[in-house]
Image (spheres, rainbow, N blue to C red):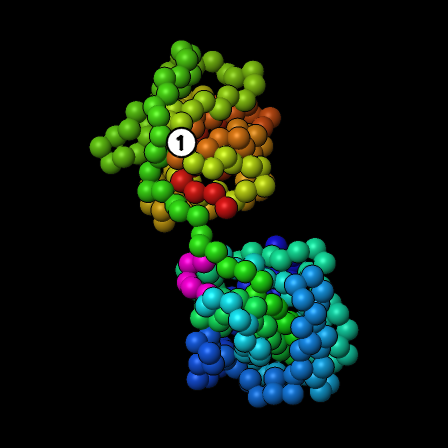
Amino acid sequence: MRRLLAILIPGLLLLTACGGGTPAAPEPSSQSAGDVAKFDSLKISDNGDQKAPGLEFPKPLEVAEPTVKEVTEGKGDRIKAGQIVEMSYVAVDGKTGKTLEDTYASGAQPIELNDQLKQGSSLIYNVVVGAKVGSQIAFAAPGKAASEGKAAGASQLVVFKLISAKDAPKVLDKPEGDTVTPPAGLPSVKVNDAGVPEISVDGVKAPKSLIAQDLIKGKGAVVKASDTLTVNYVGVNLVGGKKFDSSFEDSFGHKGVATFPLSNVIKGWTQGLAGKTVGSRVLLVIPKNLAYGDAGQGEAKGDLVFVVDILGVK
């Protein structure tokens, strides 16, 4: 996602949603909230899906609380909770009208309408769910309060267009596919009565290079290094076999499966999981230079071993 969509909208609402106003009466199924009267004079010219709309509004635009409203209704299907919505947006300074960011030229940005967004950015979630594809939505954030020696900041206005909506890819409950017998010399894996993989590293030598061995070969989509994965996993140190992390167990601070961009993890995961398929259970034996090195991170040190269940990709 682009900077303002990833930071300004979800991040700002995460900090301010608790102090937001009471949602106004629903407008075409999606919900407005905040000081929506400030948008009464906002005019938006639709220039298609590849060019930012023109915006006209009385300046300065000032709101006292996060404010959101569906300004123009689209003609497409209504958007449902759980779908992935692609949107383009333009952000401007509420005092001058100067463009701060424009994503129309680079293409629409995806947002999944999941529980995480609902909890952290409820204003955006509530206005998008129920809106129609093609709708244009205005969001304004208050400027920073004046402080000693500094003037108050201007409100910012973001207008985004809902370009498309599609159902999110299915997330599996467990790996599904064909069982694979690994070659000798690798860590062994057994599943306990609770369904958690248990890894034994007895007699296993340090890897000279990354090993990514299917234990179950899934039949779903092929993973790309740029994808976001939903997984379950267990990790142990190759030396000693101590378990340092597990998404299966609450004792490690997790609440079920983990979702993250594959580009934002250790190199051993990025390189080892790219090219695998959804539904797979993968054994990763990762040299320390593709993990956290000798210094480690927490209790994860040196060469590492993971079992990763690839349950979903997007």
Q: Determine crowd level at label 1: few under 14, some 14-19, many 20+ residues with C-alpha closer than 10 A.
A: many
* Residue at point 34%, 23% (across, down): 179
* Residue at point 46%, 68% (across, down): 78
Residue 50 placement (x, y as % from top left): 69, 61
Specify the quadrant of the image occupied by residue 188.
top left
Residue 61 placement (x, y as % from top left): 68, 83
Residue 183 placement (x, y as % from top left): 41, 13
| The magenta stretch spans residue 171 | no
- Between 134 and 27, the residue placed more toward the observer is 134
Per the image, the residue denoted by label 1 is 218
Looking at the figure, which quarter contains the N terminus?
bottom right
Q: Is residue 62 above or below residue 273?
A: below
Start-end of magenta stretch: 79-83
Residue at the outermost front position: 75
Q: Is residue 210 above or below residue 259?
A: above
Q: Is residue 40 above or below residue 3?
A: below
Specify the quadrant of the image occupied by residue 119.
bottom left
* Residue at point 44%, 71% (across, down): 130
Q: Is residue 60 visible?
A: no
Question: Which amino acid, mark 1?
Answer: Gly
Is 273 on the left-hand or right-hand side of 100? Answer: left
